[in-house]
Image (cartoon, rainbow, N blue to C red):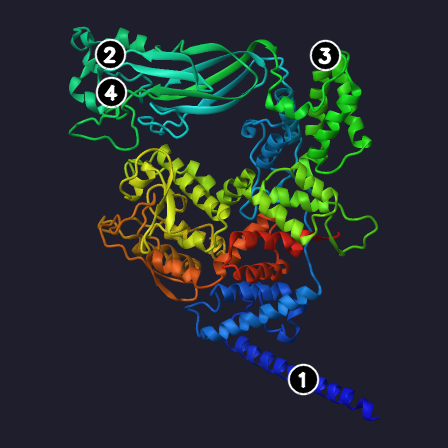
Amino acid sequence: MASCRPCIVLATLTAAAALAGCERSRDEIARHEATVSRFCLDCHNELEQVGDLTLESRSLAAVTDDPAAWEKVVRKLRGGLMPPADGGPRPERDVRVEFVSWLEGELDRAAAAAPNPGRTEPFHRLNRNEYQNAIRDLLDVEVDVAELLPADDVSYGFDNIAGVLKVSPTLLERYLTAADKVSRLAVGRPAPFTNIDYFRVPDDRSQDHRLSGLPFGTRGGTAIRYTFPVDGEYTISTKLARDLNESVPLFAEPQHLEVSIDGERVALFTLDAVPVEAASDPRAQASELIEPMISQITQRLRITPEQRVERNHADDNWEVRVPVYAGPRDVMVTFIAKTAALDETARLPFLRPYPAGVNVPETRMGAYLRSVEISGPYAATGTAPTSPSRARIFVCEPQSADGDEQCAATILATLARRAYRRPVTRTDVEPLLAFYREGLAADGFDAGIQLALKRLLVAPEFLFRIEQDPEGIAPDTVYALTDLELASRLSFFLWSSIPDDELLAVAAQGSLKDDAELERQVRRMLADQRADELVESFAGQWLFLRNLDAIVPVQSDFPDFDDTLREGLRRETELFFASVVREDRSALDLLDADYTFVNERVARHYGIPNIKGSHFRRVHLAADDPRRGLLGHGSVLAVTSYPDRTSPVVRGKWILENLLGTPPPEPPADVPELEETDGAGSIVSMRARLAAHRDNPNCASCHALMDPLGFALENFDAVGRWRTIDEAGTTIDASGALPDGTSLEGVAGLKTALLSSDGFVTTLTEKLLTYALGRGIEPYDMPAVRGIVNDAAASDYRFSALILGIVRSTPFQMRKSQ
């Protein structure tokens, strides 16, 4: 019996510890239930059920019985939304934080014991952007997919959400048309008709100076990366921009437009200067008085109506037919720059170019390009063997002019493996060979490959990411994805495209699930140029950068805003986000980095001195510079404003949704417009307008959350310029508050508040996970999100830590059966 005493003592101590733990647990539950009873049940009871939520019948002893409801509570409390700041007593911050932490711990422990990865759609159609990238990586062909396929629907803020990527009969027809064009372009077979592509230069793009990507010594114009399908002759036609009367402006100097292909000039067109004698021609009518540019206002050039008609047709024949080898070429159409000297005038133009019109002077300093048209081929002579797409496709050459089915099978098996994102068998290749044989009989080997490729490009396994439940699995069973399915998820997450050969090989060997190999692949993919898609596709949608094209500020209020600035603001944010990804910086740098990227146009807009030229460069920002981080970027500020004014409401809503992860409810349908003036006709400040708006009880609850956040950005006008006086002539009051009532002052205070918690990183992780999975985040995903954020905290939230956390997470690597 003596030998059993240690066991008895140990068992006694263990039972005592368990009992003490239970006592502590009961004490915690009782304390937190008292908090709920005091601060929550007045609204969230069985009778009122505010927000469709009652806590009266839910016990904290059984949190895991209804995780969705308690995750809703966690989100509201973490965001400081509940209890409302003006809705009665609120718990002390320590009490609220302790309660939320306890709730999260209970929910996370339950999730660890019974993981729920959710269920992604079994068929996930490639969106338009993914289709374009897949064509590029499969065939080494660049296509403008916007001309081939309609835009995709958006859900949860992104256009890659499987649930809304439906397939209609019309879309199937578009896929067939796209497959025909792409397959012909890739193989190098001319279409049965002449192809015409039209490129329009935005009317408000300044062309007075050199544009990025165009040769030095030039100004304006456009650069086009164009894929010529076959060797042959092509016609390049150009048109000049007109004024508001659709007339070609008059200039005292000749204007020379150069057309080049891969840096070699193929044509030079000249718009003649207005002859000196035209200024004194007695036939010139007063109505033909032209003020073509600021430096020529005093010259008062005149031309006759006959000369006007002739000049308006000056570019009718500005086209050149030139032989071109197949493949991608750089077509540049740009003006020869005359001088860098500044015009010395009493009146300087706005930075935005304005064409002449009735009582409107011409502010463009020279001729502008309106459009370029490329047509062909004419007199096709074949396809160059060095065409990148042919090199990618034709991994072997036929041994006979009558065809070579073995070679064709090799070509099609190689293509199918990449297109279907898995190893293929003879069963996969045989349907493609049937189309090859049909094309071969009609017009030879290349025609056979082209027809088989067309069939491959409309195959469901190319157009859809398919994830099937294992055979015989029971419903609602959690299972791990295969390595090949994981490879596709990873590739479309980081590249918005198909896996490359290395990733496919690793997955086919079953090595991708190995943690070290998975991390190696993630880091390799993030370093690849294709990871720029995280910037263009993810950041472009998360930060609303895609909306910039639709931003047209009122010209009378913002006369300097043009397409050059619009593109510059977008590029600044893209380069900034890319630097965080490429340099593996902390995600918090997105809010307060000590640098940004500007060119001369953006620097002038921001008031940054000593920046010259169209190229972007990194500039240091002082600790108190309001431009630090995304909240100081003109792109974000412009897309969260109206065309004629700022909107604290829109900006506040954007912050709640995209930075804090607590979107407000949708507004009622009968919201009245803001009154811009008072009864005496005086302009009312934005703060006063919104104060009156909040008098409406239907609006007050939501505006109490959004407006104070938006007010913190009021020092930025509707296009992102810094100001201290508003449109009413009063000093800007940029004081605001967080949803929990914490006061803040201006953009600096807002950034400090966002950096003081993990709310921003949590929201960024949710957005990244939504984008990665192609579905919305559900309550059962939140334990995984918290785990990713907690693990990333050890590395100061480095971007790679967030990405690795996502690809290692349960929702990303697993799935639930139907």
Earlier-in-chain disc, 1 versus 2: 1
Work out whether 474 lies above or below 2.
Answer: above
Q: Which mark is residue 443?
A: 3
Taking 103 as reference, is 721 left or right?
Answer: left
Earlier-in-chain disc, 3 versus 2: 2
Taking 481 as reference, is 84 left or right?
Answer: left
Work out whether 69 lies above or below 496.
Answer: below
Residue carrying label 2:
274
> Mark 4 belongs to which amino acid?
Pro
Image x and y of residue 493, in percent:
60, 45
Residue carrying label 1:
17
What residue lies at 45% left-to-right and 10% top-to-bottom?
Answer: 320
Q: Disc 2 on helix, strand or loop?
A: loop
Image x and y of residue 688, in percent:
30, 56
Label 3: few (<14), some (14–19) or many (≥20) C-alpha neighbours in 10 Å: few
> Mark 3 belongs to which amino acid?
Asp
Work out whether 29 lies above or below 260.
Answer: below
The residue nearer to you, when weighing 720 against 13, is 13
Label 2: few (<14), some (14–19) or many (≥20) C-alpha neighbours in 10 Å: some
Can you see residue 766?
no
- Residue mark closest to the camera, 3 vs 1: 1
Residue carrying label 4:
292
Q: Disc 1 on helix, strand or loop?
A: helix
